[in-house]
Amino acid sequence: MKKFLISCLLLGSIMVAKAQQTPFVLGVTDKITSRELGESRTLNIYLPEGYSKDTATYPVVYLLDGSANEDFIHVSGLVQYLTMIRFMPPVILVGIANVDRKRDFTFPTTIAEDKKAYPTTGGSAKFIAFLEKDLQPYISKHYRVRPNRTLVGQSLGGLLAAEVLLRRPSLFEQYAIISPSFWWSNQSLLTEAPALLQANLKQPVSVYLSVGEEGAVMKNDATRFAGILAAANPQLVSAKYVPMPAENHLTILHRSLYGGLDTLFHKMVPPAKQ
């Protein structure tokens, strides 16, 4: 009888403990239909603390490779931390989940080996149109945003971010370009970069560029791009290039963004309340 009573008490305690559990919510997930891509896309969105209780507007950081099992969760934590220690202002983080990143982040290549190895590639023009005509209007309509937009991309995402900067720079005011895959199509985007910047850049942008110990090609290409940015009109381009030799292709994004978000946002941190 005594054992039975003890078992009942333990079971009751477990049931009470489970009844008190609540989900830990990091953000919200939206689904939008893209006319430009002809498909549904998933957005993972982190809202700053107090968003539901105030009427303020916020800058928006758009994160490529923003699936829950890619970079959204750890970048959300980084944004929360940098906001807490006042290295950056509160922002809305929009993680763009992938469907086919090789398709969306690359422009058409003339290299036969690339076409064979990556048969779905070459769709970056449509993806950039999605950013402009589907995604940004959706975020502006459904969230309280101010006109300050940042694009974050690494690897092929860095290639896409660089292409947006060069071809459609007005879509974002700030760019974090990390380990960009300029090797794509035999460095053709790098070759075109000076002319594209001169032709398309009409308003100021801020750029944070970094690369790790990721092979000679990637390091040399990033250094070359840094030189192109440095030679551009200084009234239109504010650029910081940060080589990170202690990092590799897997470790660089989080550690690079720690400094990158601080670099891009430190002037926007509001004064501390007295």
Image (spheres, helix red, strand yellow):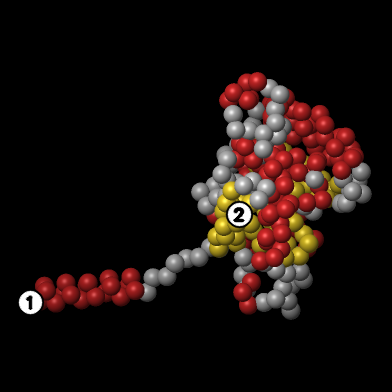
Q: Is residue 114 above or below residue 173?
A: above
Q: Quadrant of residue 102?
A: top right
At horizontal 89% and vertical 40% (from top left) the residue drawn is 199
Q: Quadrant of residue 12?
A: bottom left
Mark 2 neighbour density, 10 Å: few (under 14) some (14–19) many (20 or more): few
Mark 1 neighbour density, 10 Å: few (under 14) some (14–19) many (20 or more): few
Secondary structure beneath dot 1 equals: loop
Q: Quadrant of residue 144?
A: bottom right
Q: Is residue 84 above or below residue 261?
A: below
Image coordinates of residue 265 in percent, x first then y, are 75, 58
At horizontal 76% and vertical 44% (from top left) the residue drawn is 164
Instruction: Give the number of the mark in front: 1 or 2.
Output: 2
Q: Amino acid at mark 1?
A: Met
At horizontal 39% and vertical 70% (from top left) the residue drawn is 21
- Residue under label 1: 1
Image coordinates of residue 68 in percent, x first then y, are 52, 52
Q: Is residue 104 left or right of residue 133?
A: left
Q: How far is disc 1 from disc 2 in space, using C-alphas?
A: 62 Å
The foreground one among 38 and 70 is 38
The foreground one among 234 and 162 is 162
Secondary structure beneath dot 2 equals: strand
Residue 22: mark in rendering = none
Q: Is residue 109 above or below residue 29?
A: above
Viewport quadrant of the N terminus = bottom left
- Residue 149 visible at all: yes
The foreground one among 250 and 147 is 147
At horizontal 80% and vertical 41% (from top left) the residue drawn is 167
- Residue 262 visible at all: no
Direction top: furthest residue: 112
- Residue under label 2: 33
Q: Amino acid at mark 2?
A: Thr
Mark closest to the chain's N terminus, 1 or 2: 1
